[in-house]
């Protein structure tokens, strides 16, 4: 890297650290550390959601995926907007009035402590892996730039991120996300401009070349479930983002940060609608990279073993000094902010769902210390995952990431639908559904392709992305069946959509006729 690039990166990182130090003075209670005292404006929350979703998985894996294939892995992202349009207006205010800090308090209210702990643990395992992938892709980028071994970069970035997160709490994460959002768009515009105008054939020729070679296709429209067709990706994306809006602490925690219900809905909707054009832009970058190297005839060095390394290489070899440093700094900052947010969320559920159960008489200061200790532990665990992934020959990082998130979904979307839609849902039904989902997931994962366990015609026959979606459905179906067979014992039917609607109607009547209350 050029000296100016290194200087830009150093200044940028110093600025983010300064934000963390500034907000560290306010982190005196668990409510300030975990949900920013419910004081975040909707516009800030929306940009923060964008920055938390747009991580190094997007910066590096999306261009790598489009370079190697097409835009098919964009399809799940489209469902991000669809799901918030379908469920946001009901679910966001519901959570704001039902839970205090942890999304999984809701499952505890409906089905008891055991189900709450299952949901929390499932989320934690999935996010350890997510954080590991972000650390890995970040290290892959830095390793390509500075030549250090990937393992060393993972450990260094993990140490910096853990320190930053322990200091600043969620408020620092939110405001650094805002900085990331503006830098992100600047970097996208610069990158696309250089990819379009550097080839002597001109921008239209670059776009036409990518289009005619299918580099912007959304994939196969065949009605098959054994390949990553559009249908499979739509199903995967719908259930993945339904789970994200209903049982993902990183999103639910943002509901709780807003000042009002309406502010929360506006903020989450803004974030969802901002994400889609960013995903499309990074897919476009990958397609344009493919056309760029094809039209210019420029050879890629043999040291680039994975397609995820091509975009960072282009930045360093074709973007002017300073601008390339700013973009690399944005990748670093985005990854750090996302991992910091995930660490804070894991600390929230670790403190609220586990520590408070073990030590119900603990003080707020003790819980705050426990939360900071969980931040450090989760960061170290994510670094271990990243090192493991770095030594795994898994092909496309984005495809592998989608596979793992499908398998490890834990049926949480199905569990939420059971709790939210079924008045008769019982703890026994929820537990039966969880067991059925786990049994199915273990069988499907082990027999997938017959590589681990070959049962012949009894192998799981469909694509791995379908495992999570089917698991959600199985949990819901089995949960409903067992609940209907249970003679009694269901909890809190008022905490269903039907009870929520009735409560809202009653509140509206009371507001319109205050004399009735008297």
Image: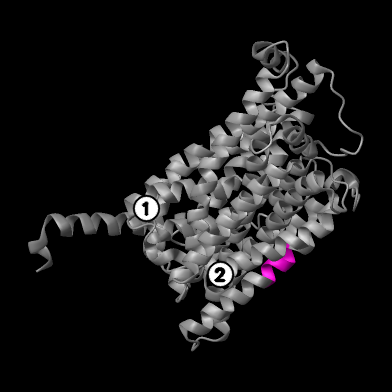
In depth, the one of 57 and 73 nearer the eye is 57
Q: Element at badge 2?
A: helix
In depth, the one of 391 and 435 nearer the eye is 391
Name the side, left or right, on which 38 lies relative to 434.
Answer: left
Q: Which residue is mark 2?
A: 167
Q: Is residue 400 above or below residue 512?
A: above
Name the side, left or right, on which 46 lies relative to 506.
Answer: right
**Residue at x 66%, y 18% (from the top left corner):** 197
Q: Any mark on residue 507, and which?
A: none
Please identify the quadrant where the C terminus is shown: bottom left
Q: Where residue 303 appears, x then y in whole percent?
A: 90, 39
Q: Is residue 444 magenta?
A: no
Q: Is residue 92 above or below residue 114?
A: above
Q: Element at badge 1?
A: loop
**Residue at x 73%, y 52% (from the top left corner):** 133
**Residue at x 37%, y 53% (from the top left corner):** 41
Q: Where residue 196 appears, x then y in whole percent?
A: 66, 20
Q: Which residue is mark 1?
A: 41
Name the side, left or right, on which 48 lies relative to 497.
Answer: right
Q: Where residue 231 appears, x then y in whole percent?
A: 65, 32
Q: Residues within 10 Å of mark 1 (few under 14, many from 20)?
A: some
Q: CA distance from mark 1 to mark 2?
A: 22 Å
């Amino acid at each position: 890297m050029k000296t100016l690039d290194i200087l830009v990166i150093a200044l940028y990182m110093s600025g983010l650290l300064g934000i963390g130090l500034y907000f560290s003075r306010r982190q005196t209670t668990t409510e300030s550390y975990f949900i920013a005292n419910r004081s975040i404006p909707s516009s800030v929350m929306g940009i923060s959601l964008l920055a938390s979703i747009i991580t190094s998985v997007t910066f590096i894996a999306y261009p790598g995926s489009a370079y190697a294939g097409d835009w098919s892995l964009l399809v799940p992202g489209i469902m991000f907007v669809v799901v918030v349009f379908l469920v946001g207006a009901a679910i966001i205010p519901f959570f704001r009035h039902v839970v205090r800090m942890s999304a999984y308090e809701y499952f505890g209210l409906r089905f008891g402590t055991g189900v709450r702990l299952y949901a929390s643990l499932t989320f934690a395992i999935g996010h350890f892996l997510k954080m590991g992938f972000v650390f890995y892709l970040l290290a892959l980028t830095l390793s390509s730039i500075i030549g250090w071994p990937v393992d060393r970069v993972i450990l260094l970035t993990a140490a910096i991120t853990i320190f930053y997160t322990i200091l600043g709490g969620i408020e620092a994460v939110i405001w650094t996300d805002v900085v990331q959002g503006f830098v992100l768009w600047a970097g996208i515009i610069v990158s696309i401009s250089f990819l379009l105008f550097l080839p002597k054939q001109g921008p239209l020729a670059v776009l036409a070349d990518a289009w005619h070679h299918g580099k912007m296709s959304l994939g196969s429209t065949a009605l098959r479930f054994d390949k990553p067709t559009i249908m499979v990706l739509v199903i995967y994306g719908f259930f993945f983002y339904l789970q994200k809006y209903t049982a993902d602490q990183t999103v639910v925690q943002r509901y709780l940060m807003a000042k009002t219900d309406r502010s929360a809905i506006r903020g989450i909707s803004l974030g969802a609608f901002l994400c889609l054009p960013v995903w499309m832009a990074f897919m476009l970058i990958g397609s344009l990279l493919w056309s760029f190297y094809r039209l210019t005839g420029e050879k890629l060095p043999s040291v680039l073993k994975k397609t995820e390394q091509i975009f960072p290489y282009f930045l360093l070899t074709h973007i002017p000094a300073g601008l390339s440093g700013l973009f690399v700094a944005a990748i670093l900052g985005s990854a750090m902010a996302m991992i910091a947010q995930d660490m804070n969320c894991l600390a929230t559920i670790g403190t609220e769902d586990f520590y408070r159960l073990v030590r119900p008489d603990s003080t707020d200061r003790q819980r705050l210390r426990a939360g900071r200790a969980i931040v450090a532990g989760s960061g170290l665990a994510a670094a271990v995952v990243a090192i493991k992934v770095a030594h795994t020959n898994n092909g496309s990082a984005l495809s592998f990431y989608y596979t793992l998130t499908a398998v490890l979904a834990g049926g949480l979307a199905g569990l939420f639908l059971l709790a939210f839609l079924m008045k008769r849902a019982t703890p026994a039904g929820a537990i039966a559904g969880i067991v059925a989902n786990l049994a199915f997931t273990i069988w499907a994962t082990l027999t997938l392709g017959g590589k681990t366990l070959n049962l012949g015609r009894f192998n799981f026959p469909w694509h791995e992305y379908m495992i999570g979606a089917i698991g959600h459905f199985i949990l819901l179906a089995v949960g409903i069946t067992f609940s209907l067979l249970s003679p009694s014992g269901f909890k809190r039917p008022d905490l269903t959509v039907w009870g929520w609607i009735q409560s809202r109607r009653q509140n509206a009547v009371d507001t319109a006729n205050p004399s009735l209350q008297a």
